[in-house]
Each structure stands twice: as C-alpha cells, then as structure tokens.
Image (spheres, rainbow, N blue to C red):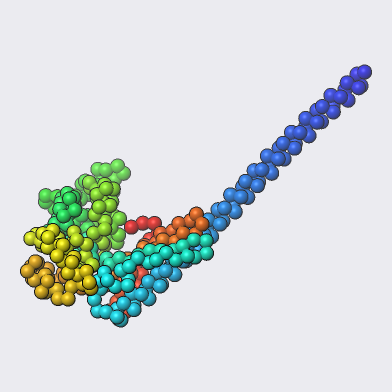
Amino acid sequence: MKIQKSKTQHRGVALITAMLIAALATMVAANLSWDNALDVRRTMVLMNRDQAVQVALGAESWVITILQQDLQDSDTDHLAELWATDLPGLPIEGGEVFGRIEDLQGRFNINNLIDDQGKIDTGSLDQFRRLLNSLGLDPRFAGIVADWIDADVEPSFPDGAEDSIYTGMLPSYRAPNQPLSSVSELAAIEGMDRATFLLLEPHIAALPGRTGINVNTATPAVLQSLDENITISDVESLLSEREAGGFSDLEATFGTLVTPEVLNDLLIDDTLYFRLKVVVRIDTVRVTMNSVLQRGGRGSVTPILRSLGTI
C-alpha cells in the first residue's frame, strides 16, 4: 500500500512540474513574441521616419526649382505668385506630403536691431516697439531683445536685460550677445511666455545681417510698424492696393507714409530669404521640416538652415 501511495505522489509531483514547465515555456514564448513585435514596430517606425525625411528633402528640391523659375519670370515677389500658394497635399506610398512657402522678408528681421558693430540700431528698435504695440504686446520686449543680441554686456536703459538677470534664474544662463539664427531663441529672454511668443512669431524672422522688408508680402502689423503715423486704415488701403500683384511704384505709394530713410534703405519689393515648411505623413509617423532658403541674384537657391519639428 505504501508503494502504491508513493507512486501516486510522484505522479502528482511530476504532473505539477510538467504544468509549471509548460506555463513557464508559454510565458517565455509570449514575451519573446511581444519583444519581437516591438522590435518589428520600432524598425518600421525608424524606416518610415527615414523615408519621410527623404521625402521632405525631395520637396525642398522641388521648391528650389519653383523659386529659381520665379526669379526668371519676375523681378519682384508678391503674394499672387505661384510660390505663395500652399503646396497641395500629394499622395505618397503609405501617406501624404504637403506644406507651404513663406517670404521671411515680409517680417521684421530681429537681427536688424543691431548694426555691423553689434550696437543697437535706434531706428529698428523704434520700429520693433511699434510692431509690439500693434500686436498688443509689451513694448519693453524691444529693449530686452536688443540687449539679448547686442555685443556689450551692459543693460540698456530703461528696458534692457543682460547677464545680471539671466544668471539669477534657475537654471542660470547668459545672454548670447550675438545675432540670432532662429527666432525660437527668443523663448529664453526675460518675461517671454508661450502665448506672447506664438503671437509674435508670425511677424518676425532671424536672417543673416541687416535685411530690407518686402512690402509686397509684409504682414499687416509689420506694415503698420514702418512709421508711427501709419493707421489701421492706411494698412487696409495698402493691402487692397497690393492684392492683384504687389505695389507698382513704392515711392508713389509710401512716399507720404514713411520717412525718406525708411523708403530708400528699408523698403523693397523682392526677396532673398524664404522658409519652406513641409509635413510628411507615412503610416503613424509625421515629420515636419522647416528649411530656410537663400536665393541669390543669379537664381541659385541654397538651404542655409534646416530643422525638424521646430520653428
């Protein structure tokens, strides 16, 4: 009887052991299958992202051709031209690509705030204050931004902010005291919040050196900032006049609205700098590429700055 009972106990232990082994094997197999599925998914996402970036670069090449042809067709740039229309959504394998081209010289160039020696340009500073006022923003940001990029480390009066302000923040940092390469850098200046930046960003650019403003494409706020005496009614008239194909005679249109210095030194009707914003979607992957394009006088177009997913 004892032998029979012992055999029964051994069979029970063996059965339980076999069940545990089967359960462990099932768990291991499930984990391996899950890990394999994740690896496959990660690989597909990386492949789709790489493909999306290449599609975005292809769109950039296409836009370069458009801008080259535009220069051959016309000496001026305005919002009735082909480049100023949104790029239609084009189907690609597994997704689509779409985007738009913007004239960056229709905006206020932040780097105009300083001259070739790195000192604050008072005329541009006044214009920036007017731009801020027209947008309902605090005009003291003009002095803060000018201090952010000017060459010295002394706060300007009354609205300046230099290292004495930024080194007291957590984490601490210092003002760059050099021209901007991207307007996104302004997110770090004293007092700047997200709402203010989003309101200001469509009207500003960070371009190499000092540049003119293309009044054919300038935003209404930028047009109003050209002189303290330009009213909202004047801006509406200007927008109506340029709608068909830009201004035909800048001197005749702006001669009574701005000072001779602004008319001769700042106002232009053609553009050297454009920004392409292209969005590519493949499956669940979405890539946004911003590319700043510089067009030379002979028609050459060169990308001078690219960023993925940023301003």
Determine whether, in the image, residue 124 is placed left or right of residue 80.
left
Above or below: residue 295 compared with residue 229: below
Is 177 in front, or is 84? 84
Q: Is residue 188 visible?
A: no
Q: Position of residue 173 (x, y in %)?
A: 28, 48
Determine whether, in the image, residue 184 is placed left or right of residue 124.
right
Is 75 in front, or is 96? 96
Which residue corresponds to the image point at 9% horizontal and 66% vertical from the top-left? 258
Count every numbered label the image shows and give the total: 0
Q: Position of residue 136 (x, y in %)?
A: 17, 50
Quadrant housing the C terminus: bottom left
**In which quadrant of the rendered view does residue 232 lie?**
bottom left
Residue ranking furthest to the top: 1
Q: Position of residue 178 (x, y in %)?
A: 24, 60
Q: Position of residue 172 (x, y in %)?
A: 29, 45
Which residue corresponds to the image point at 24% horizontal and 60% vertical from the top-left? 204
Is 1 in front, or is 181? 1
Q: Is residue 273 visible?
A: yes
**In which quadrant of the rendered view does residue 60 lie?**
bottom left
Quadrant housing the N terminus: top right
Which residue corresponds to the image point at 46% horizontal and 59% vertical from the top-left? 281
Is 233 in front, or is 198? 233
Above or below: residue 72 compared with residue 46: below
Determine whether, in the image, residue 292 is placed left or right of residue 94.
left
